[in-house]
Amino acid sequence: MARRPHSCAELKTKLIKKGFDKELIAKLIEELKKKKYLDDEEYTRLFIQDEFKLKKSGPLIIKHKLLSKGIDQVTINDLIQEIYSEELQLQNCDYLAQKKIDRAQQLYDQKAGSAKDLEQAQADLAGVSASLRTAQTRLQLIQSGDITSQNQGLSTLVIKSPIEGIVQNVHVAPGQTVTDATALVEISNIDTLWIKVPVYVGDIELIKQDEPAIIQNLDDLTGTQTKTAQPVVASYSADSESATVDMYYTISNSDLSLRPGQKVSVTLQLNTEEQSLVIPYSSILYDMYGGAWVYEQTETLLYTRRRVEIKRIQGDIVVLSRGPEVGTRVVTAGAAELFGTEFGESGGH
């Protein structure tokens, strides 16, 4: 008990593990509570203060830690609301955002980080700082005791967006009083987008990093609606858990066919050349399980269905990783009719 404060539940668990009788433990805890040696409310108060002052922890983390120590949820919520004000939370966010910028700047200076990461950190800090100023102004209005008269002296403006785009985030609520430099909404101009392409570290040297990439939607099985994306000259960002590095490509999106966060298929050019089997896309048939098949002409008016494995699709050409031998004649017109004939009317697609 002398080394650090304990909650009632912590002490009970600790004594049970040491083999003490449960009835004796209950009497001891009640005696300690009467003498104020054990006080869950005071313990919670001190814990919250240490967490936000020393560790800069947020309310959710503090709440999770206190619940694990056996403190009841009502006590936690009441004391967090009393001690950890919105202004203090934003001050901690501001501090952590500044540390993130310092780290991103250091990595960028050492060419170990990207300009995009640095810009994102700067944007995060600007947003937090604006929220902190708003909270401080709102606190001043509340402390003045006359919010109505204060609000009457504030101006209402209609602000026109400086760019055309889509609204990504709204940072304020209707009727909310805000200060100057407060971030209201986040609008993205998506005429030009960046595509992030995670690549396994061991494969990065196999890729032609200065060549364009082919982008297509995941539902574009024929590859007829592809776009070309140009490589972005920037330091790679990395993910140590998946052993990948992120390459970036920029793509024109004037038709607004792509959206931020959308997943797409990306084809990269390799430094090595290889020979592969290719067949027309019109010869490919899919079964109900997604398997790919073609019909070979083995004799005059005799056709055999063969399973193939598709490596990729480029326009009206399919590159195979496994399929018929080179020179084999495959059906390109009427393959669906053969499929229907083989399986009957219900089997045709």
Image: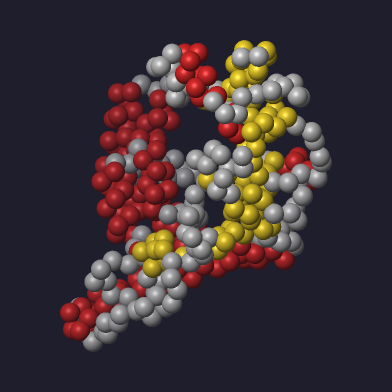
Q: Give 102 or 225, whichever is nearer the viewer.
A: 225
Q: Give 270 or 16, whichever is nearer the viewer.
A: 270
Residue shown at the point (45%, 73%) measured from the top left? 163
- Hey, which quadrant is residue 275 in on the image? top right
Residue that lies at the very extreme toward the front in this rendered image:
300
Where 74 falls versus 258 (above or below)? above
Residue shown at the point (77%, 50%) measured from the top left? 208
Q: Position of residue 99 (x, y in %)?
A: 58, 63
Residue shown at the point (33%, 60%) measured from the top left? 83
Q: Position of residue 276 (x, y in %)?
A: 75, 32
Q: Quadrant of the C terminus?
A: top left
Q: How many marks?
A: 0
Q: Position of residue 191 (x, y in %)?
A: 51, 64
Q: Give 67 or 228, whichever is nearer the viewer.
A: 228
Where 121 falls versus 212 (above or below)? below
- Hey, which quadrant is residue 131 in on the image? bottom left
Q: Give 75 or 165, whichever is nearer the viewer.
A: 165
Q: Position of residue 81 (x, y in %)?
A: 30, 57
- Hey, which quadrant is residue 137 in on the image? bottom left
